Amino acid sequence: MANSPQARKRARQSEKKRQQNAGNRSLFRTRIKQVLKFIESGDKENAEKAYGTAVSVVDKMTSKKIIHKNKAARYKSRLLKHIRAMA
């Protein structure tokens, strides 16, 4: 347990940031799953729309350093590859 005032404040800040990051990671995963759901159902139009929103969320998570930039690029590339294969 934190004893000094500085350590207590740092613990509060860390917990607040951890909760924010958890929410952001959850949003990231949700958007990816939405795109995958449309891809599996064969709905290309909705998959493309969902992909647009997913890319926006992925880029935001990358800028906030919640996910690594290479991981973001990998997700975007793989999703787009699946969408293009639907044609």
Image (cartoon, grey):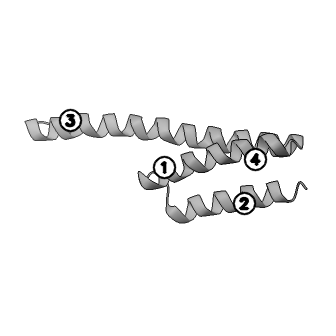
Between disc 4 and disc 1, the foreground one is 4
Label 4 and label 1: CA atoms lie apart by 20 Å
Q: Secondary structure at mark 3?
A: loop
**Would you name the residue on which mark 4 appears?**
48
In this view, the residue in front, 30 or 56, is 56
The amino acid type of the residue labelled 3 equals: Met
Q: Residue 78, labelled with which disc?
A: 2
Question: Which of the marked residues, 3 or 1, is nearer the chain's N terminus?
Answer: 3
Residue 30: image location, x then y, percent: 63, 38
**Would you name the residue on which mark 3 appears?**
1
Which image quadrant for residue 32? top right
Between disc 4 and disc 3, the foreground one is 4
The amino acid type of the residue labelled 4 equals: Glu
Split into 4 quadrants, where in the image is the N terminus? top left
Q: Residue at x 9, y 35 (%)?
A: 5
The amino acid type of the residue labelled 2 equals: Arg
Q: Secondary structure at mark 1?
A: helix
**Would you name the residue on which mark 1 appears?**
61
Question: Which of the marked residues, 4 or 1, is nearer the chain's N terminus?
Answer: 4
- Do the residues bearing badges 2 and 3 touch, measured as CB atoms within 8 Å? no
User: Where is 80 relative to 15, above or below?
Assistant: below
Label 4 and label 3: CA atoms lie apart by 49 Å
Q: Secondary structure at mark 4?
A: helix
Residue 64: image location, x then y, percent: 41, 51
Label 2 and label 3: CA atoms lie apart by 44 Å
Residue pushed farthest bottom? 70
User: Where is 35 relative to 59, above or below?
Assistant: above
